[in-house]
Amino acid sequence: MTHILRSPAFLAFVLCGLFLIPSPSEAQALPVPVLRMSEAVDALPASRSDSTASFTLSESGRKVLSGTIKGSTASEAGQDANAEGAFSIRVADPGVGGLISSLFGKKDLSLAFEFKILPMRDEAYFKVTKAPATDFFDLKGMIKKWVRVDMDGEEFYGSTARLSVKEVLAALGGTSGQYPALVFTEHGSTGKEYVYDFRVNPSQLLQLINETSRLSDEEVIYTAAEASRIASQFKAVTGTLTIDKSSYLPTRITYRVAHTDYATSLLVEGTTTYSYGKVSKIKKPSGAVGLEKLLREMEESSDGGRSTLAESAIKSSLSNTRAMAELYYDGNGRNGYKGLCADADIRNVFKSAKVSVECNATPQAFAASAKLPSGKYYCVDSTGYAAQGTKKLGPKTACAR
């Protein structure tokens, strides 16, 4: 569990979501509607949330990825740890010669899946409903039904997932200090709703994570130096919270998270809306295949078995060559691609294909090609081209179209 709680994904999740659990020791710093909201969450009825988010990833000031995430989740009445829903994710290159294009030969990829998480029963299920078909894998063709993942609830979630909000609040109120991890400012109100702007103090939030982690079987403790470094990477964690006046339940959350680590920066902006009511009991899918069995089926893929795996290895190796070639070009000055084919790192990539690879390079261009088990040739070059055909590369530095 330690590696899960220390992951950047977990921290981003907590920074976006822990404001639903304010600390009682900071009661004077929080508006009464927010405090009452925490009591309402403790007795939360069946609910549904719909989310949209956009993100951009930049490196050294240059955008390298952008994308959108949309999804919905429904929780079971009286068992809000049990949930089901669906999400779709789209990732695209914001410019020419981006990461997705260099690896997959196309500008964008889309993935959609359904899920059921039943931690009270130590079970989780997922089913891919839309997946990218690339030159070297087709995920949808591999996963055609529900897949079951067995998990040890205590190890995966820790006991904190099974505590009530009041118990978590009591733990957070132990040694949380004088300054709140969340600061709320009244934004305004309507006849039916309270509206607040909020901001997160990452260093105080990490202190609260340290305290709540003591409730689980494994403690996750950040040193002062670690907490300071992580907090400094979050340039902004802000948003708006809307609370229903009659029920004190949240109805809408907008958020903005900006994270910078050395030369890489990530910006995520999104909105989540909530509705409450009766949700049918969440049932586990029938006839689900176990994860281990699925992996065996993927390896023994009916479309060619080992030859399909060998073909995938060749295409993957040559696709990796394209990305590495651009790095080589950037660091080789006026010589550009010259010497690329003899580079030790490139040669190691060629070896991973386990077949003979033709490679030609000049300062201005390069191309690499290998024969597939099917008898065709897979070729990549410096124009971004990646495809299979019937012609050998020969002495050229561009693939035959």
Image (tube, rainbow, N blue to C red):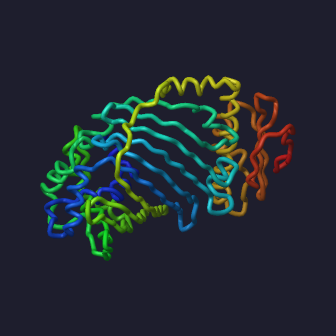
At horizontal 37% and vertical 53% (from top left) the residue drawn is 13
Q: Which of 219 and 251 is in front in this view?
A: 251
Indicate the position of residue 146 as horizontal and vertical percent values: 51, 31
Task: Count up the numbered dots.
Answer: 0
Left or right, 81 with reference to 99? left
- Asked if residue 354 is positioned above or below residue 328 in the image, the reply reads above
State whether residue 32 is above or below residue 107: below
Foreground of the two, 274 or 216: 274
Q: Where is residue 174 in the image (x, y as percent from the top left)?
A: 12, 55
Image location of residue 202, percent across then percent down: 30, 62
Image location of residue 51, percent across then percent down: 45, 56
Position of 35 with respect to 10 (left or right) is left
Residue drawn at the location 79% of the way across and 54% of the way down: 362
Q: In this view, does 354 lie to the left or right of 367?
A: left
Quadrant that contains the N terminus: top left
Camera-nearest residue between 328 and 254 = 254
> Viewer-proximal residue, 72 or 103?
72
In the displayed structure, 55 sits above or below 29; it is above
| Left or right placement of residue 382 versus residue 239 in this view | right
